[in-house]
Amino acid sequence: MDDKQSVRVTILSRPYTLRVAGDPREVQAVADSVNDLMLSIADRMPDADSTRIAVLACLHLADRLRSLERQIETKRGVDPQLVEQLIAAVEGAV
């Protein structure tokens, strides 16, 4: 059974119809974010074609993803026992 819904989004003035299994509002929000990013790039590079704008947007998003992955890895590296000790110390001070 196909429970996917069609969602119509617009990115750089081009309409796209996407089939999604999740929340259509979430897909629309993501598309709006991508559109905003690409429009921002296009404003700074008025002579760039849509392919160049899309590649630059992908590089920007990939950089953000790697940064978040590094932050997660850093937090995973924290000693859980130390965290518990700090929590106990803060609770004891209150």
Image (cartoon, rainbow, N blue to C red):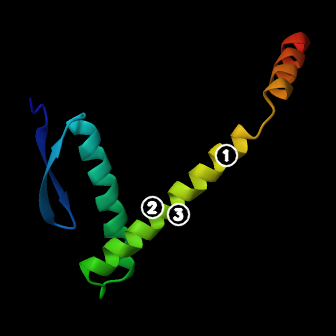
Q: State the image coordinates of residue 23 (x, y, percent, origin top left).
A: 24, 33
Q: Is residue 72 above or below residue 16?
A: above
Identify which residue is drawn at 86% across, 24% down. 86
Identify which residue is drawn at 24% across, 37% down. 25
Report the amino acid beneath label 3: Asp
Report the amino acid beneath label 2: Leu
Identify which residue is drawn at 52% across, 58% down. 64
Q: Which mark is residue 63?
A: 3
Mark 1: which secondary structure? helix
| Alpha carbon distance from label 1 to label 3 | 15 Å
Q: Which mark is residue 73?
A: 1
Q: Is residue 92 above or below residue 28?
A: above
Disc tally is 3
Q: Nearer the viewer, residue 2 or 38?
A: 2
Q: For mark 1, does the 10 Å Cα neighbourhood hold few (<14), some (14 to 19), or many (20 or more) residues?
A: few
Q: Is residue 13 left or right of residue 32?
A: left
Q: Is residue 86 left or right of residue 36?
A: right
Q: Which mark is residue 91?
A: none
The residue under label 2 is 61
Q: Are marks 1 and 3 in contact (CB under 8 Å)?
A: no
Q: Earlier in the sequence, mark 1 or mark 3?
A: 3
Which label lies toward us, 1 or 3? Answer: 1
Q: State the image coordinates of residue 34 (x, y, percent, origin top left).
A: 32, 58
| Alpha carbon distance from label 2 to label 3 | 5 Å
Residue at the limit of the structure toward the front, as seen here: 1
Q: Are marks 2 and 3 in contact (CB under 8 Å)?
A: yes
Q: Is residue 94 left or right of residue 66?
A: right
Residue 42 visible, this orientation: no
| Alpha carbon distance from label 2 to label 1 | 18 Å
Assign the N terminus to one quadrant of the image.
top left
